[in-house]
Image (tube, rainbow, N blue to C red):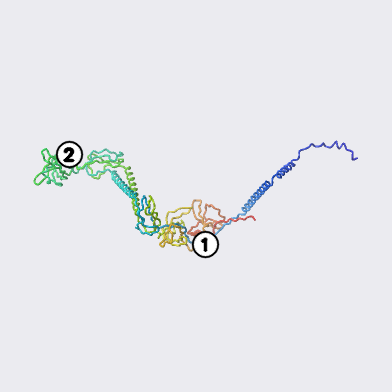
Amino acid sequence: MSDVIDKSAVETAPPAESPQPAPPAEQPQKEKSSLWKKWKGMNRKRRRRIVRLFILLLILIGGAYGVKTYLDSRSSGTETTALTDFVRYDAITATVQGSGLTKAKDSETITIATAGTVKEVLVAEGDTVTAGTPLFVIDSDDARTAVDKARQDVLGYEKQLSTLQKDIAGLNLSAGYPGKLMETVDLNPGDTISKGQKVAVLADDTRLRITQYYSYAYEGMIYEGQSVDVSIPALMSSIPGTVEALHMVSRITPEGTKLFSADILVNNDGALSAKMAASATVNVGDEIVYPYEPGQLEYFRTGDLLSTVNGTVISSSLVDYLQVSAGQVLVRIDGEDSEAEIFSAQQSLDEARKTLETAEKNLANCNAVASINGKVIGLTIKPGDEVAANTTVVSISDTSSLLINATVDERNVSSVEPGTMVDLDQWGTMAMGTVDSVSLSSTINNGVATYPMVISVDNTEETLQVNSYINYTLTASENDNCLVLPLQSVRTVSTESGESMTVVYVKAGSAPENAVEGVMIDEMIPEGFWPVQVEIGISDNYNVEIKSGVEDGTEVYTQSMISESYGF
């Protein structure tokens, strides 16, 4: 029966398992329920803010992915194409263009260097003046004082220099007159000698002098230049003499005789010496006049021989009783210090003269006249003004002729010379000028050398403004029929040997015979192009003349063009 329970089946059934923990999969469900409850518990405003932030995050992620995809498509589609050109015959004209500031060819600015009071102003701004036109009068005591002081300084330095130059002559210390050396100092090479040091006494014994006294009874009978006889007892002889000078003194003898003196000169043939006794007799008519008493011979003149410089003795020939001639060098001296003094004094004198010149010019400017023909373009004073020192009071410019400072580059400088015609344009006003000069000194900027150039232009009708910019254009050189290439086709390169040259890259299946080897390149040159050295000539803004290296029709590399596909 179906209601009967099978006990054996019950007994043999496996025991019931004990309860186990819930599977892990069920936990997120609980967390999900918890998050939902939190979400539901938020107010509406907060839920909207969270939604917006979530949407913005999705947009940023999508945008970043799109940019990456775009860039990847571009890089994968880049292509490089070599652009070329052909050597061809054409005309080329090299021009120099630029702008410069116009200025008067001749101008004058008068500045008062010292303070003063304006007494008169004789011109007005805009007046046309000629050289010599009085301009103004300024009274300045300071200007007059400056001139006086500068003149005194110049005179002082001139005297100082003159003295030093005379002293420096003493580097070769020599006899000033003929005579005999006495009281000499022993000097050896290397000894130090001082300025003013006495080294010897020089006695002029070529003539000797004796003083004799005669009675006033013979006044007028004895006169200067009169011949006399001089008796020398030591020689037991008489020699001729001459009355050099008379002195109408009043010497009274013990006998009461009044005497005057006479200086008698005798020539020395070498036998006479100082301190020899002598007496001179004078023939007056038939009478022989004797002196009151004998006298002694004296040297005609004596003097100390002095060094005029500080220095070191190079050589010396000083010896007692040495007979010397005028100008004979006796001591040689090395005087470096004295030479330095002269150099310093000369510099001081030069500076003083410049100061005097400036002071005199400033004083003249106080009563200034125009030194050039021109127009008064600046005037800052009026009568009664107190002018401060270093004030510019008037400017005059000759605007009939203008100058423009310009430049020419190294490629065209050899073709520009004085006299080259220049087209000028100042705000629509056209004019024609000429190159006045081209400097040989260059300035280098960004690897390009430029040379200063001065352009002159006639402005007699005053159609051009002074101190205003103007455009200039000149034709440096031109060629009506020559081989040309675009500028970008020509390159300056260096070789492995360090040589610099100008080349073009010629298209060919293999290297041409004149291809250059060992070129150091700093750019990617496509395959199939070979460097060939060329000689270039003039150039314009687009093309350059090719003088040699390639022929008409030769295809050359210019540059590379990068093309890109966007992957669409």
Count neighbours of disc 2 (C-alpha within 10 A) and say few if under 14, some if 14 to 19, many if 20 or more.
few
Residue 505, horizontal then vertical, whole percent: 53, 56
Closer to us: 192 or 319: 192
Residue 31, horizontal then vertical, whole percent: 72, 42
Q: Disc 2 versus disc 1: distance between alpha carbons?
A: 113 Å
Closer to us: 116 or 273: 116
Q: Residue furthest front?
A: 384
Q: Earlier in the sequence, mark 2 or mark 1?
A: 1
In the image, taking residue 166 as reference, residue 227 lies left or right, namely: left
On residue 170, the disc is none
Count neighbours of disc 1 (C-alpha within 10 A) and say few if under 14, some if 14 to 19, many if 20 or more.
some
Closer to us: 270 or 24: 24
On residue 275, the disc is 2
Q: Residue furthest bottom?
A: 480
Query: Could you say which quadrant of the image residue 12 lies in?
Result: top right
In the image, taking residue 398 as reference, residue 315 lies left or right, namely: left
Query: Could you say which quadrant of the image residue 235 lies in?
Result: top left
Closer to us: 517 or 258: 258
Q: Amino acid at mark 2?
A: Lys
- Quadrant location of the C terminus in the rendered image: bottom right
Residue 472, horizontal then vertical, whole percent: 46, 59
Q: Residue furthest right?
A: 1
Is there any visible trace of residue 518 in the rendered image? no
Mark 2 and mark 1 in contact? Answer it, CB < 8 Å: no
Residue 354, horizontal then vertical, whole percent: 34, 49
- Quadrant location of the N terminus in the rendered image: top right
Is there any visible trace of residue 134 in the rendered image? yes
Q: Amino acid at mark 1?
A: Arg
**Is label 1 in a helix, a strand or a loop?**
strand
**Eye-nearest disc, 2 or 1:** 2
Residue corresponding to mark 1: 88
